[in-house]
Image (cartoon, rainbow, N blue to C red):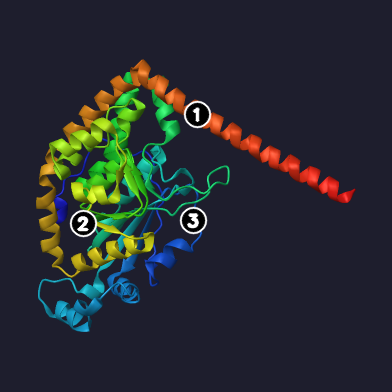
Amino acid sequence: MMNSLIRKSTLLNTRKVASVMFLGAKRGFHSSMMSRQTDPNQYVQFDELDVTDCIKMLASNSNFNPSDIHEMDLKLSEEKSGFTPMTHKTIGVITINRPEKMNSLCPETAVQFKALMESSRITNNNRLAAIILTGAPPAPDSEGKMNHPAFSAGGDYDFLLERIDDTPFNNANRMSQFYDSFLSPLLRICPVPTIACMSGHAVGAGLGIACATDIRVMEATAKMSFNFVKIGLSPGMGSSLLLPYLVGHQVASYMLLTGDLITAQKAKEYGVVLDVMEGATACRHRSFEIAVQIAKSSHIASRLCLHALRVQKIAGITACMYRESDAQVQSFADEEMKSLIMEMKDKEERRKAKKQQEKEEKLRLAKEAAAAAQQ
């Protein structure tokens, strides 16, 4: 029924089908996602958890009161005509998995995300009640330094550098396809509510993806920024449409024109996020609490309501993506942006060189100390 209501985008013809992981998990969501071995080239991962398992997991947490979700609720749900029994429902978890790059978004991420969202695991999955979108936990970078927690750090640095040397025609196509790979699946294709679990920083295009979800929960120490203008780039990932829709013209203008770094609490005051939680675990638990609450509702009614809520955003998103892509083509050709990007590149290279010098100096001192000890 919903397939006829939700239109699919035709902007991007995916030329390869990415493999995505599916786990019919019988374990707690945290252990199932953190303990398994993953393909380093699998930038988007999918897990599906039974709602009843999620309830048990939440009930084991002292901060969650499951008093309104008990066996009688499950029994009544099974007896009500037209309801998908709650015991049959699942909650999906999509993880952006580039922790060594702070979950930044590259073309491969876009292809895999679109392939997953268009697959039958989501579009034809009548058990699915909600999807939680999150970023992989922090991991060491190429130098062994632990990254900050991140929902997503936005567009991949190398991807942006490539745009400077490409043609305007190619850039317009690549950017519109890149944005469409995330926004059309979230707004047009996905038949169930999406919840962004922002247990780390969200920047640029990564924040744009979060704004395309239906509900957002953020960890208290995490921060967000639409930093496009700070690197000489016109805003993208639908931010010029989605952000004003959430916070109004004035706040959106401030956030997009300044690229200011916003705290989680300020984001809640502005209306960007629903809840702010202390700690990554609490942030994940709150996201699952909301998903379980959604799962208690009528399956069909929930999906129809969701479509009605998204109509206004869907109506303007295609024109927005083209408009933003065209504006970014002009940005890529601007000498100021080239200068800012090269400055960022030089700064990164200097940082790496300094780090290497410090490493070599520590090694030299260690060798001298060892030689002195032997004398």
Label 3 packing within 10 angstroms: few (<14), some (14-19), many (20+): few
First of labels 2, 1 by sequence position? 2
Tell me which residue sits at (36%, 52%) in the image: 221
**What percent of the width, then of the height, locates residue 253?**
19, 33
- Residue 62 visible here: yes
Q: Secondary structure at mark 1?
A: helix
Spatial CA span between label 2 and label 1: 41 Å
Q: Which label number is shown at residue 347?
A: 1
Q: Count the marks: how many?
A: 3
Spatial CA span between label 3 and label 2: 26 Å
- Residue 1 visible here: no
Tell me which residue sits at (18%, 79%) in the image: 73
**What percent of the width, then of the height, locates residue 87?**
25, 75
| Up-down relation of residue 133 to residue 103 (above or below) | below
Q: Which residue is mark 3?
A: 38
Query: Label 1 amino acid?
Result: Lys
Would you identify the image quadrant in which residue 355 lies?
Answer: top right
Mark in front: 3 vs 1: 1
Query: Label 2 amino acid?
Result: Pro
Tell me which residue sits at (57%, 46%) in the image: 144
Would you identify the image quadrant in which residue 142 lies?
Answer: top right
Query: Label 3 amino acid?
Result: Thr
Spatial CA span between label 3 and label 1: 32 Å
Quadrant including the N terminus: bottom left
User: Hey, which residue is sitting farthest top in the picture?
Assistant: 335
Label 1 packing within 10 angstroms: few (<14), some (14-19), many (20+): few
Mark in front: 2 vs 1: 1
Q: Which residue is mark 2?
A: 193
Q: Nearer the viewer, residue 182 or 200?
A: 200
